[in-house]
Amino acid sequence: RVAVLAFLSQAVASQPGLADWLFEADGDAGTEAGCASAGGGDSLTLDDKASPEDGYYTGWILEVRGGRGTGQRARVVTRYDGAARRVQLGEPWDVTEASGTPDETSHYLLARQLQLSRFIK
């Protein structure tokens, strides 16, 4: 089951726009949107509304929806520092002349991954 979930997480994260489909089905929409305050090669600093709890967004999917970095495929959050409000990503951003590294102009969407274990028996 773990291997299947890991494969599906990476497959879905590789498709721009699919983060909209990744949510909890128990009444919690499981998404948060905001404007980044900074970006790095494999990280993004979230806005002041983000959770201050360490690890809160670990395992979530992050997609840049506007500003610098738009159009890149979504990334899986592998670590979250609540004090700094910084997500560490499973792989670095694809830096191109067109998209660039996400920064303070970037608008993001964070989405919980669908809990497939509810359907896999």
Image: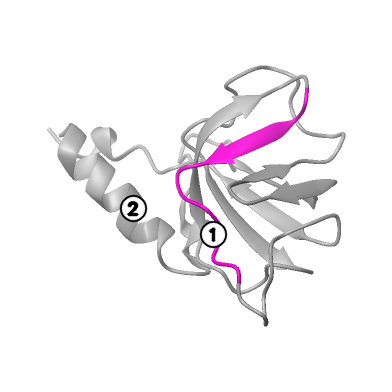
User: Where does the image place residue 106, in percent across and percent down from the top left?
Assistant: 78, 60
Location of residue 87 by image quarter: top right
Give the crowd class for mark 1: few <14, some 14-19, many >=20 residues within 10 Å.
some
Binning the other alpha carbons within 10 Å of mark 2 as few (below 14), some (14 to 19) or many (20 upward) gives some
The colour mode here is one colour
- Mark 1 = which residue? 20
**Residue 56 at x, y = what percent?**
60, 24
**Drawn side of residue 51 relative to residue 88, left or right:** right
Quarter of the image containing the N terminus? Answer: top left
Range of magenta residues: 84-95
Residue drawn where x is 59% and y is 43% of the image: 29
Q: Residue at x 42, y 57 (%)?
A: 13
Q: Is residue 90 magenta?
A: yes
Residue 108 vertical position relative to residue 113 in the rendered view, above or below: below
Residue furthest out toward the bottom: 98
Instruction: Give the structural element (helix, strand or loop) at label 1.
Output: helix
Measured as percent of width and height from the top left, residue 113 is found at 44, 42
| Residue marked by disc 2 | 10
**Image point (54%, 66%), residue name:** 94
Coordinates of residue 14 in the picture (x, y in percent): 40, 63
Q: Mark 2 belongs to which amino acid? A: Gln
Hey, what amino acid is under mark 1? Asp
Q: 2 above or below 33? A: above
35, above or below 114, in the image:
below
Task: Kindly report which numbered mark, 2 or 1, lies closer to the viewer in this rendering.
Answer: 2
Please state, as top left, top right, bottom left or bottom right, where the C terminus lies in the image.
Answer: top left
Horizontally, residue 84 falls left or right of residue 28, namely right
Which callout, 2 or 1, points at the residue further toward the start of the chain? 2
Going by the image, does 87 lie left or right of 48?
Answer: left
